[in-house]
Image: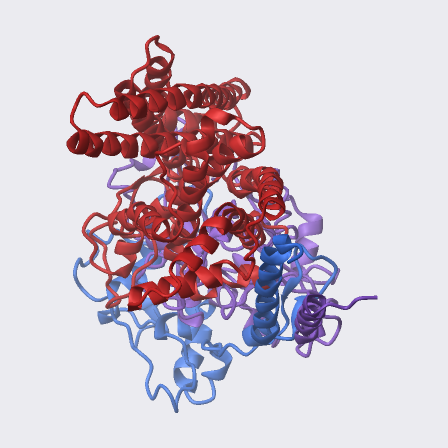
Amino acid sequence: MLDQLATNGHLIAHGMDWTIKEGFVYPNEFIYWSIQIVLYPYMTGLVAGAFVLSSLYHVFGQQDLKDMARFSLVFSLALLPVAMMPLLMHLQQPLRGVEVLFTPHFTSAISAFGIIFTTYSIIVLSEIWFVYRTYFVEQARALKGKSGVANTFMRGLYTVLSLGAWDLGEAAVAKDKKAIKILAGIGIPVACFLHGYAGFIFGSVKANALWMSPLMPVIFIMSAVVSGIALCMLTYIVIMEWKKFTTTLAKGRGDDSVRLIKGAEIDVISKTSRYLIGFLIAAITLELLDLIFRGYTAMKSWDILRSVMYGKDFMNIFVLQYGFGNLVPFILLILPRLTIRRTALALVLVLFGVFMMRWNVVIGGQAFSLSFDGYMHYVMPIIPHNIETFKEGLGGAVLVGITPFVLFWLINKVAPSLRFNN
Amino acid sequence: MKNHVLRPLFAAMALVALILTARALMVPSDFGVHGKSFTYNFYRAGAVSDWKNFPVSYKGGASCVECHDENAESLAASRHRIIQCENCHGPARNHPEDPETLTINRSRDLCLRCHADLPYPGSLRSELPAIDPGEHNPGEACVECHNPHNPNLEDME
Amino acid sequence: MKCSRRSFLKKGLGSAIAASLPLSSFKFLSPAEARAAVGDPAVRWGFLINTYKCTGCGFCVKACKKENKVPYDLPVTRTWVERYVITKDGEAHIDSPAGGRDGYTDPKIEDKEIAAEEITKAFFVPKLCNQCQNPACVQVCPVGATFQTEDGVVLVDRTWCIGCGYCIMACPYGVRFFHPVYKVAEKCTFCYHRITKGMKSACVQACPFGARQIGDLKDPDDPVTRAILTQRVAVLKDEYGTKPQVFYIGLDENVR
């Protein structure tokens, strides 16, 4: 298949460049949903998880999460446009993507994207506005009279961002806090929808023997929250370590301020990791339940599914996802005397595990033919030789991976989310 | 200043207004439910006539007879009468204007489609006159001996 | 009652927004102002395949590709023919090289020799879009680009499809693919442009042996309808509830 490249000049059949067929596979079958479709639920999962984490503070008043909350809210915003990137890179007609807003066919799970994404964006942006309104107003006032292009630009930006709401009196600020609480509360189910519907996209495809399951939306949500919490915790740790490092450089090793940072850090981390463990248990329980049921009921598809899961994909599923991605971090987190280093390792493994879950669902679901008598092997394009192998290969994946951090850096210039002085 | 709380809501409403305006401009007016069900009949009505107007390429053997009467006659008398002219010669499209000539395919592979021997009990394939391509004049064009419009060797001129 | 400048501005802005929205922007459902005919509901297209008659010549696949301008050399096709060879050990040897486009000229399957004496039965199975009555592919299209006409054919609007591939994943029969040139979803249309003019589908016309037939299921005198009503016929994968409209005579249990 791979050596059967374009005989029609530059024309290719989508998927033939990265699909290797084995056994009897229908002629039109290729890996149509590749790395970008693996990344899309991963990114929306991070978005949902980050938002839920932030809401835990705003709605349920978990005081220990105060610092984390602001940070994860802004990070949730940085992740939001990135959630759309894999879709735009996957669509064969990306400029028509806006049609999901114009003519949504509501019988399709994907049609929910337009409305849910727009609603969720509005909620996150609004909540951030209320959180930062005071800051925007203060900045706009502080930059008044200052000269220079940058200052003038920033002053203009902050003025626009303030939406003309200049009142910083007690009553107004109290209204802000109330609005934040309400939005955080409404946002939780919407964030769950943003990711849950992705699970429904797969779970409702009756033609796919691996995907079809009512458990799919719930599994996706659970593992999404896991990944969101893990990413926020990890980024928080990295930033705190950097902060400790710079403080040590500035003030010397024995200085108390470093110990203070360290103390706050371990406190937040160990409390947040309790939530992480809870969702981790929920996610793995559901996945094992799905697997056990399939084996027990042994439908027509079971033979090929079993050969894929216990054979070809055994490493991907049981070793990488369940082993390194679930079991090892679980043990690392519940062992006593939790350290930052051990937590960081566990978090990296968790993020990897959630990625592998997306991979095993999306790619795994296309690893076997509809004929139940053949296999398709996905070879992710590393070096692109055309636009398609870039978009649907390593290039596109890396682009999606680094963009949230770039956006986060940009957003922080306007709405700083990292404050270390209590 | 009363109730700044609603400002983000106004911004959101403006966004929705923008989307709806874009929608009014960009969605064709014949887009909607054309039939009994939203599930299966939600589409742009013009798409149906788009497909009806797709150009026809294969005209059918009946349209070849007028000019190619000799070949058509001998074909009609042979066992190859069941094969459409265009199966071997390609689609007529607007022949003789465009294309001026159709291909004449003299390759072995064309004939082997039916006449390569495959021992398949129960399939019509095994009832067709067939040869083993490796044994029967390998490498030679079948048309060296067999007239495709009258393939029976006994009737050959 | 005090009308402050603020509240005046607020109300003014609100009504300005409301006035800028043309009423048609709220119209999701366009009533019967559809200018083009949406299919003739008096007809319901059905297809009949006789696997006893198919010889695997592949003329149907060739004709389809040329008629419908699907790139000839690429491994995607609106219709294809599968070969099944069942041997004495009960094993089914199955292949479909280039979808059967070049016919079947080699008894070897996947480079494996199969001795003639070992073969208990063998046959060819043409496949195409089943134009299901409850098409899963239409259900999952997020934008209404694929749909079912009144006469039962499932079509794709090439100007509207966004190329997400959900319909391709949702089809249990694997008949859909991305068109390499138009970059939208593509599949067999029963040659809608021909059948609505009284012609036969390209594959039906090309088949020398009458293994493929198309007809009107609403007409009791139609030969296809009569065959379905009087003979033992089957459809592919009926467990998915899609209600396929392509009927097979001689559909073997080995057929995938």
Q: Height in image: A277 above or below A120?
A: above
Quick one: A116 or C176, which is closer to the camera?
A116
The chain that appears red in the image is A
Image colour for chain B is blue
Quick one: C103 or C208, which is closer to the camera?
C103
Left or right, residue A374 beside residue C200: left
The structure residue drawn at horizontal position 51% and vertical position 29%, both measured from the top left corner, is: A300
Q: Position of residue A6 (x, y in %)?
A: 24, 61
Q: Height in image: B62 above or below C236?
A: below
Q: Height in image: C149 above or below B89?
A: above
Residue C61 visible at all: yes
Q: Position of residue C64 (x, y in %)?
A: 44, 65
Single out the residue that lies furthest toward the bottom.
B97
How was the colour assigned to the protein in this rendering?
Answer: by chain
Q: How many marks?
A: 0
Asked where in the image residue A189 lies, by quadrant, the reply is top right
